[in-house]
Image (spheres, rainbow, N blue to C red):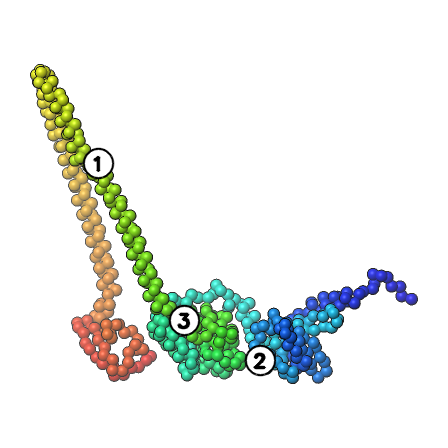
């Protein structure tokens, strides 16, 4: 008889835990089957079974996973579920914890979408460091979308209202097999042939199949390669495509893309008024500050002005003279000696002043000669530099090109450098070497 020890005996809950741990090691599964026994609980959890011709699998679709789901099946629907196997320990039965539930047909598209998303993400196409900054004040915006859809009209109306700029449409199909190639052609056109400041690519809402052309790998790589910032605006706010992830900025709708692409001129006007108000306040503050400094300087200057100091000493001298004048009258001899001493001091001072004046004159003459030589050298150097710049300026002057047979074409004071900027019957002004002429456009040919 087989000997059994107490350690060899398991409780039912222990067995269920072991099985739960083993099953928990299995990877995420995609399971296809038909819905049966569908039950939506008041807690938000959904329970159902998946069955095929021979087997049935219990499934639980908990609220934290189904809260964002846009698809609610019914019994008999064929679906595709993504989830992990688990064991419900109370009954010892295993079940699939569903994380994503899709109709079977759309499920194939979702699998392709997820696979491409993981591939491009691993290559770094979605990385934030590759995102380009959207220009704050664009002059030209290129729109790649259907010319007949409402998306372009929405974009055009919002751009015109918020921040008038030049809008250029590249017409392209936005659903179907040919759509990716036409969208790619639009990106190349705005990057290589007709550069703009910002590109908006997208369309209005639709089904997942309608939007799937924006999940094309070649299109994603073309958006990533664009050196012009790209705003993706595909479908509605809840729709996400590969183009949204790889673009420099994702807008939930075409209208939102237009709002992202340009500022609101009303906000700019308010900002300018605020800046003007701040500038005026700072100017007033500075004026008050420097006015205070000026008044303080005026007060200090008045107190220390040599004239005022001289007046003070003069008054003190007058006081001393008045004090001692009477006593000096009684000492004529002392007054005579002081007079003689003063005369000698004046004589010696005049002699010394004459010698110093002569030395100063010599120094001044030497400095004047050095200054004249330095100025002459500077004038010659600047004159040489001026001549060199004059030759360079003449070489770069557009009027030198006019002597070789070229002309400058203007339309309403604006220089024309492309046939796309003129139309038939436009009046053009041509500047030649020796004068101007006026002509009218009769034919346009684009290279």
Identify the residue shown where x is 43% and y is 71%.
230
Which quadrant is the C terminus positioned in?
Answer: bottom left
Q: Quick check: 168 left or right of 25?
A: left
* Mark 3 Cα-neighbour bin, 10 Å: few <14, some 14–19, many ≥20: some
Q: Earlier in the sequence, mark 2 or mark 1?
A: 2
Query: Mark 3 to mark 2: distance in Å?
Result: 32 Å
Q: Nearer the viewer, mark 3 or mark 2?
A: 3
Image coords of residue 28 (percent x, y): 65, 71
Instruction: Left or right? Give the position of 187 relative to 239.
Output: left
Is residue 78 shown above or below 161? below
**Mark 2 lies on residue:** 106
Identify the disc placed on residue 259: 3
**Screen quadrant of the N terminus:** bottom right
Q: Residue furthest front?
A: 42
**Quadrant housing residue 99:** bottom right
Q: Residue at x 70, y 77 (%)?
A: 57
Q: In the displayed structure, would residue 354 be above or below residue 181?
A: above
Q: Quadrant of residue 155?
A: bottom left
Return the residue at label 1.
Answer: 304
- Residue drawn at point x = 19 percent, y = 47 percent: 375
Q: Which mark is residue 360?
A: none
Dot 1 and dot 3 residues touching (CB under 8 Å):
no
Picture coordinates of residue 167 (x, y %)?
36, 75
Front residue (pair 134, 129): 134
Query: Secondary structure under badge 2?
Result: helix
- Circle count: 3
Can residue 347 be seen here? The reply is yes
């Amino acid at each position: 008889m087989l000997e059994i020890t107490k350690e060899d005996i398991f409780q039912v809950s222990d067995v269920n835990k072991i099985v739960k741990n083993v099953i928990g090691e299995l990877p995420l599964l995609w399971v296809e089957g038909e819905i049966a026994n569908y039950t939506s609980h008041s807690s938000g959890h959904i329970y159902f079974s998946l069955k095929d011709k021979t087997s049935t699998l219990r499934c639980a679709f908990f609220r934290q996973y189904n809260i964002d789901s846009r698809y609610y099946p019914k019994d008999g629907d064929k679906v595709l579920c993504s989830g992990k196997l688990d064991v419900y320990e109370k009954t010892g039965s295993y079940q699939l914890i569903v994380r994503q539930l899709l109709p079977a047909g759309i499920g194939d598209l979702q699998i392709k979408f997820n696979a491409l998303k993981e591939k491009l993400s691993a290559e770094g196409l979605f990385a934030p460091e590759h995102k380009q900054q959207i220009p704050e004040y664009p002059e030209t915006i290129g729109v790649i979308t259907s010319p007949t859809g409402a998306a372009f009209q929405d974009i055009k109306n919002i751009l015109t209202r918020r921040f008038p700029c030049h809008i250029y449409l590249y017409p392209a199909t936005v659903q179907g097999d040919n759509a990716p190639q036409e969208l790619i052609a639009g990106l190349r056109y705005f990057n290589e042939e007709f550069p703009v400041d910002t590109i908006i690519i997208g369309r209005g809402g639709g089904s997942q199949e309608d939007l799937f052309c924006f999940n094309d790998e070649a299109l994603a790589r073309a958006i990533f390669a664009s050196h012009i910032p790209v705003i993706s605006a595909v479908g509605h706010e809840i729709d996400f495509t590969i183009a949204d992830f790889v673009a420099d900025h994702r807008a939930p709708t075409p209208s939102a893309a237009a709002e992202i692409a340009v500022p609101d001129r009303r906000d700019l006007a308010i900002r300018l008024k605020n800046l003007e108000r701040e500038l005026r306040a700072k100017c007033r503050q500075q004026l008050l500050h420097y006015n205070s400094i000026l008044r303080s300087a005026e007060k200090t200057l008045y107190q220390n002005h040599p004239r005022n100091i001289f007046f003070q000493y003069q008054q003190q001298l007058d006081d001393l003279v008045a004090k001692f004048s009477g006593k000096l009258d009684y000492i004529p001899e002392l007054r005579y000696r002081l007079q003689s001493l003063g005369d000698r001091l004046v004589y010696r001072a005049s002699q010394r002043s004459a010698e110093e004046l002569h030395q100063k004159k010599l120094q001044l003459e030497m400095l004047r000669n050095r200054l004249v030589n330095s100025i002459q050298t500077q004038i010659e150097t600047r004159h040489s530099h001026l001549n060199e710049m004059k030759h360079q300026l003449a070489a770069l002057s557009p009027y030198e090109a006019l002597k070789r047979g070229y002309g400058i074409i203007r339309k309403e004071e604006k220089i024309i450098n492309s046939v796309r900027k003129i139309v038939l019957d436009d009046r053009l002004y041509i500047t030649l070497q020796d004068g101007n002429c006026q002509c009218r456009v009769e034919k346009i040919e684009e290279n």
